[in-house]
Image (cartoon, helix red, strand yellow):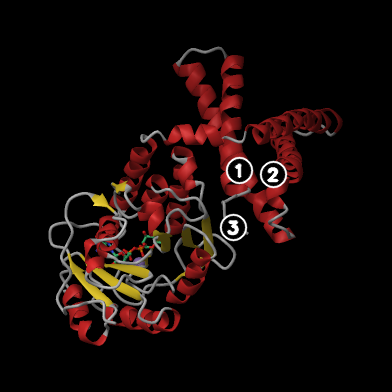
Amino acid sequence: MTINVSRSLLPTPTGLLEIPALPEVAQTVRPVYFSLVVPTYNEGRNIQRIVSILTGLLDQTFPHDYELIVVDDDSPDRTWELAQQMLPDYPQLRVMRRQTERGLSTAVIRGWQVATGQVLGVIDGDLQHPPEVLPQLLQKIAQGADLAVASRHVEGGGTSDWGVVRRFLSRGAQLVGLVILPSVVGRVSDPMSGYFMVRRSAISHCLMNPLGYKILLEVLGRGQVREVAEVGYVFQERQEGESKVTWRQYVEYLGHLVKLRSRGRISRFTAKFPVDRFLRFGLVGLSGVAVDLAAFYLLRVHLGLPIARSTMLSAEVAVINNFLWNDLWTFGDISQNQPGTRQRLKRFLKFNLVCLAGIILQALLVSLLHDAFGMNEFGSKLMAIVLVTFWNFWINLKLSWRVTDVRK
Ligand code: GDD
Ligand code: MN
């Protein structure tokens, strides 16, 4: 049964960014199971390929029970027109040309507002998100997940040959998110992902108010998502056109985090703060202080090494001590699900980096508290140790022993 009852463009919704339980159009056409939005801006050289590949794939999985919704923001290369010309050959295709609004996140929401599916998805229109991952995501939803995310940071995931800068920016953005909005960003391993699907019931009647590119943050931050599942995918190199990500998207991302945080997400965070695990982490840290001092004594008194070298070596001995105990005891229940030497070495390297960042943070805090606020030296050192312990604990929990509520 054809979905697009006419070959014309879809009407563009206006007003609030709220996903209805089911849109009015569902009174005139039979609703489908799965609606996949493809947001486009200047994808004229990709649009035919992506529509034909997605159609070929979904015709096998859900014949006549899905729809593709291209939401184009009046691209200068007239992507919307190229998509519209495909309508006669692709009965499951629908096309929206937005002329008064712009932006990736709102494009996805406007597409979901006219969708008729019980499951709402989004995939980039430039073939950087491999379509062959879709059946695995749909399977996760069928198994009960409310949200199924294609992630670059779980087994089977990765980025093709991203430069160091883009990798650093992406991981850095994730780190900032873990600090500002841990209860949201910490729920998935790839909060930057723009490739996922969500059960309509988990986001219907939620008033969305996204900024920029990160629609997944909005779904996690405002939706009622209980179960999250993840599937690894490798982010592909673009063949045609170029990325629209600029520094502006990173600034908008920060604004988006702060906006979501101000919605009282803190309460949910404190309710979920793992106190017992934190206490174990603190005890391990104390054992590290004793090991640090003992090693320092041995290196200085018995081996006569210079003080700077003794300090650094004894600090590293303490880090190794802390990692072993944390990996065994504090986070043992998590690390046992991440077996193998390679995984353990990865955790150890991340732990070291976080501790190194913690040492730098501690030095900054001591000078701030002592020099700027006139606090006495030992008081500022003690205060800095306490603050950095929270930092070390939280970032290690979310990065080194990354735990997501992924269905096993
Ligand atoms: N309608 C609309 N409006 N579409 C847009 C806009 C816009 O303002 N900006 C970008 N798009 C479309 C692009 O045409 C493309 O199909 C998709 O959104 C992603 O845009 P890119 O500019 O190619 O983003 P990227 O490849 O650097 O990053 C993508 O992948 C990351 C990892 O999943 C984005 O999806 C990121 O959000 C995501 O983190
Ligand atoms: Mn892209």
Q: Which mark is residue 396?
A: 1
The kind of residue tagged 1 is Asn
- Which residue is the site of mark 3? 407
Q: Nearer the viewer, residue 382 or 408?
A: 408
Q: Nearer the viewer, residue 356 or 120?
A: 120
Determine the quadrant in which ligand 2 lies. Answer: bottom left
Instruction: Label 3, secondary structure: give it.
Output: loop
Tell me if I can see residue 333 in this picture: yes
User: Relative to 221, is 381 on the left or the right?
Assistant: right
Q: Residue furthest front?
A: 27
Quadrant for the C terminus in the image: bottom right
- Disc 1 + disc 2, Cβ < 8 Å: yes
Which residue sits at x=51%, y=66%? 142
Quadrant for the N terminus in the image: bottom left
Residue 287 spot, x, y in % from top left: 76, 31
- Which residue is the site of mark 2? 331
